[in-house]
Image (cartoon, grey):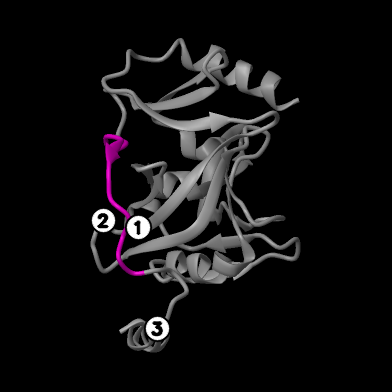
Amino acid sequence: HHLQALWTLVTMEQTAQSPVKKAQLFNSNEYYWTAPLDGIRFGGTVSGSYALNGAEVSIDTGRQCLYVPSENYEFIYNTLLDYSTGYYNTADGETVVDVVTSEHVESAALVNGYWVEIAPNDYLNTVTTEYNGATRSTGVCRLCVKESWDKKWHMGTSALVGYYTEFDFHNTQVSFTRLSAGTKLEVVAGTRPDRVLGLSIFTFVVLSSAIA
């Protein structure tokens, strides 16, 4: 059950270093912790920022990766792979990236009015192998971004690394706080980007003309 999984995560996070700032992000319904997802950003620039219309994101502690709705998946997938030096798809459908995570872009999601960092280490998982009794890196990473099974975005446990994540069952809220010893960016309030993901310039001009 999701609530049991969430409680387990809370217990683990309470042993982490004291938080420096708290940002309430998610509200709970009966089964999931969900919030509006107003935008996505690549590289921390205005040109890499996109608004999302009517999108929602949930915390799903039963999964690891970031899951993107089909209407946005191809764009997100291709944008992240643009920063790789090469990649290939395995027989079981995994995308393996031939690049170190430091060469990839810092991304962020605008969750309920707050920018939450999605670091390269969150969506790129190092592929390891066992050699002479030791675990070693193979030099490639698995892309931990998948197509969602529904119209929601789903944030798995890998995106929570580096944050003190507090699940408040009494007030049915979740808060994210950057760990002071971590490398994640501060969770800060932000505004919805002007450019809408999936809306072309031609469509924008036509709509603007029609409104005028």
Q: Which residues are magenta?
A: 184-195
The secondary structure type at the circle numbered 1 is: strand
Q: Which of 84 and 76 lies nearest the eye of the viewer?
A: 76
Q: Say which residue label 1 marks.
A: 41
Magenta stretch, main secondary structure class: loop
Identity, as a three-letter code, of the amino acid under mark 3: Leu
Identity, as a three-letter code, of the amino acid under mark 2: Gly
Q: Which of pointers 3 and 2 indicates the residue nearer the eye?
A: 3
User: Where residue 37 appears, x then y in whole percent?
Assistant: 46, 49
Q: CA–CA distance between discs 1 and 2?
A: 6 Å
Q: Which of 49 and 169 lies nearest the eye of the viewer?
A: 169
Q: State which quarter of the image contains the N terminus.
A: top right
Identity, as a three-letter code, of the amino acid under mark 1: Arg
The circle on residue 207 is 3
Q: CA–CA distance between discs 3 and 2?
A: 28 Å
Q: Say left or right for 107 vs 63.
A: left
- Report the residue at 65% width, 33% height from top: 32
